[in-house]
Amino acid sequence: MTLKTAWITGATSGFGAATVERFVAGGWRVIASGRRIERLQQLVARHGAERVHAAAFDVRDEAAMRATHADLPHAFAGIDLLVNNAGLALGTAPAQRADLAQWKQMIDTNVTALVTLTHLLLPQLIERRGAIVNISSIAGSYPYMGGNVYGGTKAFVSQFTQNLRTDLHGTGVRVTSVEPGMAETEFTLVRTGGDQAASDQLYAGVQPITADDIADTVWWIANLPPHLNVNRVEMMPVNQSAAGLQVHRG
């Protein structure tokens, strides 16, 4: 049996790390990319270099991305699935008090890096009739205080996914946007600069989505029969729903 290969970005924590584990357990090879080499090395040590290839670089570094792609070992060179998971939210302030540098970092990571890697791999994904799963967010559909640029980047990811789907019509390539709601990973720690109390408070009593939930969802999408395409999956914990509109009375 020929093993399939997935490239999973943001593989050092959260959704990405769990998705690596799920695909390796399911018999795939995985190119695991991320910034933290020590965590990638742990994945290789746990599963073996024949199943996981560690690619340590900042996804915003296009030169490093292209060099990694060019230098892939032969066994990992045929990519059947791209999981664009790398992304982040920074800051919770309203737009008028937000840090512009954080806005730019979110755009560079969540948008520019995602489209750059997708563009790089498209010829091969078309040749192999592969699949793309983009990890978006309900923040791209439902605005909330402090969501500003993060929500904007995720709206881009969702719309880019659907436009990719249209452009790739007839190629056999499947494209899906996965749009999670409240999920407990390192997400809030990153967003708040490491505030564990803020993270604990956010998720208290919610029973949020887990990284494994998302990994299982991506696994299901990737292993559907090739004539089926899931356009988008919007997921929330049962304890979360869309908020009502706010009204200011002055």
Image (cartoon, grey):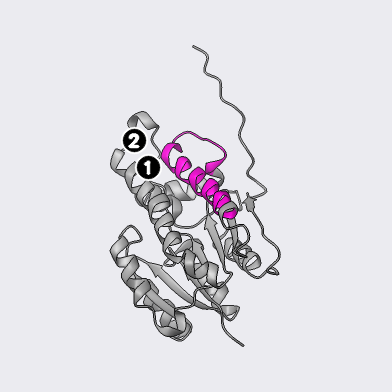
Q: Is residue 169 left or right of residue 91?
A: right
Q: Is residue 152 left or right of residue 165?
A: left
Q: Is residue 176 left or right of residue 98?
A: right
The residue labelled by disc 1 is 91
Query: Residue 11 in magenta?
Result: no
Asked which quadrant contains residue 210, the reply is bottom right
Q: Are marks 2 and 1 in contact (CB under 8 Å)?
A: yes
Q: CA distance from mark 2 to mark 1?
A: 7 Å
The label number, if any, that marks residue 98 in the structure image: 2
Q: Earlier in the sequence, mark 2 or mark 1?
A: 1
Q: Range of the magenta residues?
A: 139-165
Q: Can residue 133 be seen at all in this image of the molecule? A: yes
Amino acid under disc 1: Gly
Magenta-colored segment: predominant secondary structure: helix
Indicate the secondary structure of the residue bearing disc 1.
loop
Classify the position of the N terminus by image quarter.
bottom right
